[in-house]
Amino acid sequence: MLHIGLDDTDSPGGGCTTYVAAVLVERLMGLGAEFNGYPTLLRLNPNTPWKTRGNASVCLRLKIDESLYGAVQNAVKELVDEYGEFSCDNTNPGIVFLKGNVPDNVKTYSDTVVKSLVEKKLAMDLIEKHEMDYMEYKNGRGIIGALAAIGGTLEGDLTYELLTYRTPENWGTPRRMDDASIVAMDATLSNSTFNNLDEKGRPLITPRGPDPVLYGVRGETPEAVYDAMQMIKPLEPVERWMICRSNQGTDLHYDVPVKVSGLEPFNPAVVYGEVDSIPETIEGGHVFFRLRDKTGTVDCAAFEPTGSFRAVVRKLIPGDVVTVYSGVSIHEKELTLNIEKLALHETASLVTSVKPKCPECGGSTGSMGKGQGLRCKKCGYRGEDLVEEKVEQDRVIVPGIYLPDKGAHRHLMKPYERYGREKAIELIV
């Protein structure tokens, strides 16, 4: 049994680690490899400052004759040499090889990489302890994700993604798709796929960058995403396709709630507390409010790309009890929670003061100054019975889970349609 982990071959300007893996599958089949299940596509901590695009690593799990191990290593190296985006400073590929079953501490390590920042030394210590072979390029930071992909055996909730790839001559050009076929596919397979269209019915399955991916469909089973491919009509050639097991759409990057005092930059964070300020909209359409727990306060931000989600945030008032699911960033030198999901548990009372009508003439009343009571604006009546009444207003927001618009979903975020679809399996590798 051999596990091959790959990471960090792409850049914002092109390339794709899953494409390298797809080509590698064909090379290894030519060597006689027998694959154990689908490749693992593991999305790592989405807040990592060194990520290129989607921060994905890949693992292939296979059986092959021991005598061909050297040929396998050469095949991997040749493809990374060919397709690695080495001109980018943030592209630092890593490759890890593990023989046998995946140790429990490597699985634990993988979970840590998805949920936090990890130093390369932690990966290297495990590689040395379990006598794994590895290859690294430049500073070798890709070793972190490559080992995490090996440990990402996905024994709890998981999803599948079918990725199709463009022919090289089309890389970097506008993608050509029959959008109507995507809409029809979604209508047919909405119970088994997710995030195909945005709230306005526009396709979300095609990336915008110069990478080789033509489109990717995510779903609950391999059969669902394969059926989707049969319904989608690309208007350009598809060079190859591959189905992966993945942690996408699972919320598995979130850990147990953390106190405000325990927040760390560039980590996912779940924080429970009370709204401590009236939400404020700043230039650019971003909405901010303060969140408080027993250890302190922190700014929370719903940025403009989250769309209609900002209208939800604007309805919060001080005293509302919420859990904020977020990524921790630094905004104007202060830690800020970039909101990815909001759970509203309890709504505070919204009380307003209503001035009475004049009992003499029915006119409106107004204040005569601090501590001086009210008087009628029309007839001047100033009776002691003119007292403001406290009235509780209906809230226009109710407890529940609120998400940004689909176009702002990060890869790991669980969309509404996956609630209730979560699965748990056991995979022994």
Image (spheres, rainbow, N blue to C red):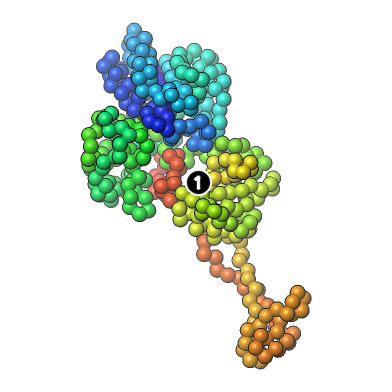
Q: Is residue 421 or residue 269 the one in the foreground?
A: 269
Q: Is residue 179 left or right of residue 312?
A: left
Specify the farthest residue to the top: 67
> x, y percentage for residue 151?
46, 25
- What type is the residue that disc 1 sits on? Glu
Left or right? Give the position of 340 relative to 59.
right
Which residue lies at the image location 62% right of the left edge and 43% below the top edge? 332
Q: Quadrant of the C terminus?
A: top left
Q: Can you say whether 202 is above or below 108 in the image?
A: below
Reply above or below: 236 against 392.
above
Image position, residue 58 (x, y; %): 40, 27
Q: Position of residue 360 (x, y in %)?
A: 66, 92
Secondary element at image label 1: strand
Count of marks overlaid on the render: 1
Residue at (30%, 18%) from the top-left corner? 28
Residue 283, above or below 80: below
Residue nearest the viewer, comparing 54 with 380: 380
Q: Residues within 10 Å of mark 1 (few under 14, many from 20)?
A: many
**Residue under pointer 1:** 340
Q: Quadrant of the N terminus?
A: top left
Which quadrant of the figure has residue 392?
A: bottom right
In this rendering, would 233 be left or right of 41? left
Q: Position of residue 381 (x, y in %)?
A: 70, 89
Residue at horizontal 45 percent and vertical 16 percent from the top? 135
The residue at 44%/45% (across/down) is: 409
Q: Is residue 244 visible?
A: yes
Which residue of the protein is positioned furthest toward the right in this rendering? Answer: 371
Does residue 255 show up? no
